Image (cartoon, helix red, strand yellow):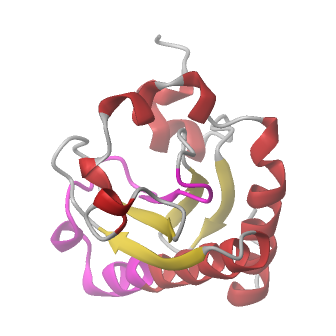
Amino acid sequence: MLNDWRADRIGSALQGRNPTVMKRLDASFAVIGDTQFLPGYSVLLADDPNVQRLSDLPRTKRLAFLASMDHLGEAVEQACRSLDPAFRRVNLEILGNTDAFLHAHVWPRYEWEPAHLVGYPVWLYPHDRWSDQQFALGLQHDAMREAIEHHLSVLTGNDHS
């Protein structure tokens, strides 16, 4: 696992080895999630692996990270809306309970989700959704990834990729 980019997601992004990176943003990397049981799921990674929480960043970088989270959230929303008419909304979360580096989750939510889950936190989904290979990021997610990347480029007006 030492050569696996998953062992150091931020370090591998800084080195250009993280294949989930969609775009380099200010103080962060926009990545598509490893699991896609909610298509379009993305994560914003801080660009410093030593930063554990938002408050660890100096104010200017903190605001840059939050602005990038806003851009990623809007890009995911636009991409999901264009690709699935059952798109509902995007949920943004900074948790940090499992991984000890600053990151933000961008969860698209859909009308087709099970009724007992659609109005609740995504963390209530059964464990198999997170690990089942049928939901693993793959070529079938290329259209969604490309749509998010396109909207990110339009929204940010720059090219750090």
Q: Answer left or right for 146 relative to 112.
A: right
Residue 135 percent location from the top left of the image = 58, 35
Q: Is residue 98 above or below residue 71?
A: above
Quadrant in which residue 100 is drawn: top left
Image position of 60 (left or right of 29): left
- Residue placed farthest to the front in the image? 115
Q: Where is residue 113 in the image (x, y as percent from the top left)?
A: 47, 59
Q: In this view, does 62 lie to the left or right of 144?
A: left
Q: Is residue 142 visible?
A: yes
Labels in figure, total: 0
Residue nearer the viewer, 137 or 158: 137
For the record, the magenta segment spans 38-66
Residue 93's quadrant in the figure? Answer: bottom left
As drawn, 156 above or below 125: below
Quadrant of the rendering where the C terminus is positioned: bottom right
Where does residue 128 sit, x and y in percent of width and height?
Answer: 39, 28
- Quarter of the view holding residue 87: bottom right
| Residue 95 in the figure: left or right of residue 146 | left
Taking depth in this image into account, of 116 and 2 the one nearest to the observer is 116
Residue ID at (73%, 35%): 138
Q: Does the magenta stretch include residue 64?
A: yes
Residue drawn at the location 26% of the way across and 78% of the way down: 58
